[in-house]
């Protein structure tokens, strides 16, 4: 069947690369389309111009090109209800409905669901006015965790050390610093521990573990500086031991999937749980309704199963008949190369030369790249996702950084310490 992939970042390049290897395409001669895509995705898919907010236009394209399944990469079209419009038109889609995507679209929605279902997460209060929020601070101890309720591209969380800082941040949030996302603010208890991400596929009834990863959200080495979409990641996250993973499925993911099904809004697609491994056990930080970026890149490097078949099984509610998802034993690690200025205003147009970068087996996924007069240039904040595998995080990092060093991108930068926690643990273990 023909497949349409929506999105144009490093996550979607990894999805396109893996989908292009699917039997759904290789054994049929059917085609992969991507909108808007990027120059990396163009190696695997035919790029088309489509406005994902124009549901009618997406449906018309699908009908015209006999698209059998739409794969939605980013969260915004899902929270906007694109999957509902496609399903209503009889088109299969990998990604949740608008109602189920509220897991990412509204932090308050998720916290309320956790409370009803007894899912371990930080204690919280939802507030709708500045006065209410300031008063609610009295119920918490510093550091204060303040979250814009809606979508804020991963930047809607403020952790304030003092009451004064918290009040100033709340004034900003209710003053519109996150746009409408900050019309409501969730205040929650600070959780201490190591963070890990867990991914599961679900069709609303069956849950299939898809793998784990650890992200590096801060722009600077040693996890310092402002938050970003993610500067690097590796998979698996060994801190999420098989025992803890079982606990996460049983106490967090499965009850969430059940609660949404019971509410008449079953979740279909990939569920991305951001977790804090606390001394009291794993607790949910947040949910995302899509693959992580750059977590997707490392998961796809390890995936040994047919991605298209798995996505189709989700879309057709037959995940219960699929075998466990097979992941390779190797560790995968990705280093994000960003344009100078990111996460503020990134420099556009910087020249990129990738010749030889993949010689050692690394894979360079494109994120914010473009072609200008036939040459590759930077066209976004996160520009490349340089990914390699190895028998350990240390080895995967060495290979990824060797590829980074082979890339000529003088207006770009990256963190040199991706994987540091695990590298330190591997060093300590000898
Ligand atoms: P979120 O967008 O909800 O994933 O939050 C962004 C980041 O803020 C997380 O990756 C954590 O590092 C941090 N964070 C969020 N909530 C909490 C919390 N309750 N306690 C400690 N850190 C948190
Ligand atoms: N890397 C974090 C995210 O995709 O939300």
Image (cartoon, rainbow, N blue to C red):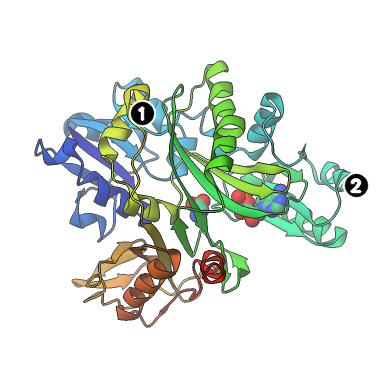
Residue 281 screen position, x and y as percent: 68, 43
Instruction: Please tell me which residue lies in front, 245 or 234.
Output: 245
Q: Residue furthest front?
A: 430
Kindly tell me whether mark 2's CB lies below 8 Å from ligand 1.
no
Badge 2: residue crowd in 10 Å (few <14, some 14–19, many ≥20): few
Q: Quadrant of residue 284?
A: top right
| SS class, disc 2 | helix
For label 2, the residue is 138
Q: Left or right: 166 with respect to 390?
A: right
Looking at the picture, does residue 67 appear above or below residue 303?
above
Q: Left or right: 35 with respect to 24?
A: right
Residue 303 screen position, x and y as percent: 32, 47
Looking at the picture, does residue 314 appear above or below residue 190?
above
For label 1, the residue is 314
3D distance between C-alphas at marks 1 and 2: 44 Å
Q: Left or right: 185 with respect to 393?
A: right
């Amino acid at each position: 069947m023909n497949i349409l992939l929506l999105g144009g970042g490093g996550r979607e390049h990894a999805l396109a690369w893996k989908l292009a290897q699917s039997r759904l395409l290789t054994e049929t001669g059917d085609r992969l389309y991507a909108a808007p895509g990027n120059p990396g995705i163009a190696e695997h898919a035919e790029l088309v111009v489509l406005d994902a907010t124009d549901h009618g236009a997406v449906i018309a394209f699908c009908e015209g090109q006999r698209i059998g399944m739409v794969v939605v990469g980013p969260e915004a079209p899902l929270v906007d209800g694109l999957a509902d419009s496609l399903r209503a038109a009889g088109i299969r889609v990998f990604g949740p409905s608008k109602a189920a995507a509220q897991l990412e679209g509204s932090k308050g929605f998720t916290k309320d669901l956790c409370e009803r279902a007894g899912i371990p997460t930080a204690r919280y209060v939802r507030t709708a006015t500045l006065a209410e929020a300031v008063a609610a601070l009295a119920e918490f101890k510093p550091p204060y965790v303040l979250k814009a309720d809606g979508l804020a591209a991963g930047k809607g969380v403020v952790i304030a050390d003092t009451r004064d800082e918290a009040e100033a941040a709340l004034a900003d949030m209710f003053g519109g610093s996150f746009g409408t996302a900050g019309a409501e603010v969730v205040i929650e208890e600070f959780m201490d521990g190591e963070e890990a991400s867990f991914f599961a596929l679900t069709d609303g009834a069956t849950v299939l573990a898809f793998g784990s990863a650890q992200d590096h959200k801060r722009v600077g080495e040693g996890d310092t500086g402002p938050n970003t979409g993610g500067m690097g990641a590796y998979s698996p996250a060994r801190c999420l031991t098989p025992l803890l993973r079982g606990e996460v499925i049983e106490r967090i993911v499965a009850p969430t999937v059940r609660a949404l099904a019971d509410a008449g809004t079953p979740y279909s697609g990939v569920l991305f749980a951001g977790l804090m491994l606390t001394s009291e056990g794993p607790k949910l930080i947040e949910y995302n309704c899509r693959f992580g970026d750059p977590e997707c890149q490392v998961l796809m490097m390890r995936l040994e199963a047919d991605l298209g078949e798995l996505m189709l099984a989700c879309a057709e509610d037959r995940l219960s008949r699929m075998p466990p998802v097979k992941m390779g034993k190797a560790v995968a690690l990705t280093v994000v190369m960003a344009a100078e200025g990111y996460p503020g205003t990134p420099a556009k147009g910087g020249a990129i030369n990738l010749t030889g970068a993949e010689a050692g087996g690394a894979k360079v996924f494109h994120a914010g790249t473009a072609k200008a007069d036939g040459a590759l240039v930077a066209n976004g904040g996160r520009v490349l996702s340089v990914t390699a595998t190895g028998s350990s995080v240390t080895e995967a990092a060495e290979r990824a950084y060797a590829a980074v060093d082979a890339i000529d991108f003088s207006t770009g930068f990256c963190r040199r310490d991706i994987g540091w926690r695990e590298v330190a643990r591997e060093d300590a273990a000898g």
